[in-house]
Amino acid sequence: LAWAAWEAANGGDGFDHVEVTEWPMIFVPWVLNSHRKPCLVQLHGSHGQIALGDSTGAPVFEDAWIRLIERAVLREATAVQTNSELNGSVWEERLGRPVSVEAPAFALSGAPAPGSGALRRPLLGRVFGRMNQGKGAFALADALAGEAGKIATFEWYGNDAGYGATTVSAAVRERLPGPMDQTLRHRPPITHAEVLGKMTDGSFVLVPTLCDVFNLTVAEAMAMRAVVVCSRHAGARDLIEGGVNGFLYDPLDPADLARVLRTLDSLSAEKVVAITDQGAQTVATKLDPKASVERRVKFYAELAAAPRPAPLSEWLGEALSGSAAPNDPGALLDRVGLNELSAAMLRRVPGFAAKH
């Protein structure tokens, strides 16, 4: 796929500069040829990074191999950039090179007017996004098994994710049946318009993630003048000053969520309005699209003036280059024994695994 994209773009012919994401390995041809065309790789959440943060309970060999490729190639890119200080630190440590940080541009039309922020009682928190381990489903359930579950109820809107032979919601339910049934209710995905409505009905928005790059739900909720409680492991924590325009907590410390919920429960209506107005102003200032464009153009100009990097090693280029030879995906099955093939086929038969 990466090489097909490279060929479709004629290797960047006619362009001064190329910007490409690191997922899903789409950056490889551009970095291998960055001595011909300056290339900026945006670190939005690589295959290897997602695999590390969202384990399904079963190790996959290919994930480790992909992380090795990512590290080797991204170290040689003309430049790498990401949306948050948190993700920048992660990649600087991993790559041993500087990582530029530029927050995403964001603007929301039709946002509520100043002074419209509200917080209902009893407290109701809402999570928007796929229910998986990386987004903090298990950590949130652990917190709700304690004091936090006595202070607020929660609704989680989004697709369920696979987890081994089951799903995340089923694993949480089996592990903590009380919180799942009483205080953490999983709901199917809803439309964007419905999300905005549920952000502005007095519920607060919780972002319990254990790893992400820049969670735009945080920016959107702040722009909608919702009270936001954000994990310290979320890249969008850069937007929040605790108690001023939102709240931060440690998702791995169940008592810390309870602390924040007690604070929310004690807020006056006037304080809620002040916090939500400040949140909307923070998004308008820090994520202003016009200012973002100006900073990006300046960054591109600096890259264009920088010396071209040397070509990557011939060995690495050969190992990661595409081939014109025909590819038969089914040829891999020739290496698998008949017993293993039969077992794999039977596992796909509906109801067979459950009975056996």
Image (cartoon, rainbow, N blue to C red):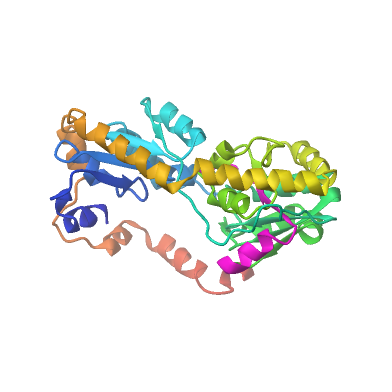
Furthest toward the front, the residue is: 114
What residue is rendered at 77% in x and 40% in y?
260
Residue 149 place in picture, x, y as percent: 82, 49
Residue 151 place in picture, x, y as percent: 84, 49
Q: Is residue 152 above or below residue 245?
A: below
What residue is rendered at 48% in x and 50% in y?
106
Q: Quadrant of the C terminus?
A: bottom right
- Determine if residue 63 is in view: no
Q: Is residue 322 left or right of residue 158?
A: left
- Determine if residue 196 is in view: yes
In-front residue for pair 354/139: 139
Furthest toward the top, the residue is: 96
Q: Quadrant of the N terminus?
A: bottom left
Quarter assignment of residue 125: bottom right
Q: Is residue 161 above or below residue 267?
A: below
In-front residue for pair 207/293: 293
Furthest toward the bottom, the residue is: 350
Q: Is residue 32 left or right of residue 261?
A: left
Residue 207 place in picture, x, y as percent: 64, 48
Q: Is residue 85 magenta?
A: no
| Magenta part of the chain | 191-212
Quarter assignment of residue 350: bottom right
Residue 245 place in picture, x, y as percent: 66, 41
Q: Is residue 289 above or below residue 186?
A: above
What residue is rendered at 30% in x and 40% in y?
297
